[in-house]
Image (cartoon, rainbow, N blue to C red):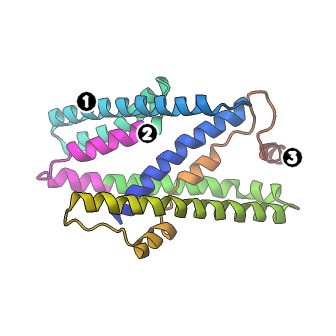
Amino acid sequence: MSILEGEGLFNDVTAIVLYNVAIAAAVGGSFSAWDAGLDLVLSAVVAVAVGLALGWGANKLMDLLGDATLQIGLSLLVPYASYVLAEELHGSGVLAVLTTALFLVEYATDADDVMTRLAGHTFWDIVDTLVTGVAFGLVGLELHNAVRTAAGHWGELLTWAAAIVGVVVLVRLLWLLPATWLTQRLHAARDTAEEIPVSWRETVVMWWSGMRGVASVALALAIPLETDAGAGFPAGARSSSSRSA
């Protein structure tokens, strides 16, 4: 399960970064593959640097606090600071948050501090449940608008939905196959006794049962209704007209 969760986490971050690039291209009305690639690299470098810096600083501050309640409260504030700072420096806020979180998980958790670990796990489980509930609640609030907008276009929408799902599933398989092959080669070269899921059966399981989270819901809700020129965003004009009706 931890492998699936880790893979899902990095998939979400990658998807969000690419989503931001696609939205910027659609809203701005122009796209350059070279500029987009350069922006992605610079964004990633800035994000990792910010994430590591804030993770290191938060780790030192947690050591000074020495109280589980204060440490957990700080762990709630640091991701926001990491996101805002990275975005201000034109980096990826999501990647910065992920970097900070991974740093804190690796270095800020004392294996002997059972109280802090248990309290932290409980706190973040509650936060995760609340955030997921709010996100799907917002989807429910938008459901009547979606149904009204789709009136008379169900065939077209279902066709597009099936096509998108098919492409996503196929691309996931095409990614996992070479990734599995590379993992096998690297694992064989290291000559370790560690067991990792690299058989074709386990690859099929990972392909079909990859973690599904709330990220796709949040991204769908974040799609703008208009471009920079004031024109309706693709498929957003009809939605906005339906809302104003």
Pinpoint residue 181: horizontal percent, then vertical percent: 40, 62
Q: Amino acid at mark 2?
A: Leu
Quarter assignment of residue 37: top right
Can see residue 35?
yes
Quarter assignment of residue 2: bottom left
Q: CA distance from mark 1 to mark 3?
A: 51 Å
Q: Nearer the viewer, residue 228 or 122?
A: 228
Contact (Cβ within 8 Å) of mark 1 with mark 3: no
Q: CA distance from mark 2 to mark 3?
A: 39 Å
| Eye-nearest disc, 2 or 3 | 2
Residue 245, disc? 3
Residue that mark 2 sits on? 95
Residue that mark 1 sits on? 57
Residue 237, disc? none
First in sequence, mark 1 or 3: give its number. Answer: 1
Q: Is residue 148 above or below residue 81?
A: below
Q: Is residue 245 left or right of residue 46?
A: right
Q: Nearer the viewer, residue 53 or 194?
A: 194
Q: Nearer the viewer, residue 177 or 207?
A: 177
> Is disc 2 placed on a helix, strand or loop?
helix
Task: Report the span colored magenta.
Answer: 96-122
Q: CA distance from mark 2 to mark 1?
A: 17 Å
Residue 108: in magenta span:
yes
Pinpoint residue 50: horizontal percent, then vertical percent: 36, 29
Q: Nearer the viewer, residue 104 or 174?
A: 174
Q: Residues within 10 Å of mark 3 (few under 14, many from 20)?
A: few
Q: Amino acid at mark 1?
A: Gly
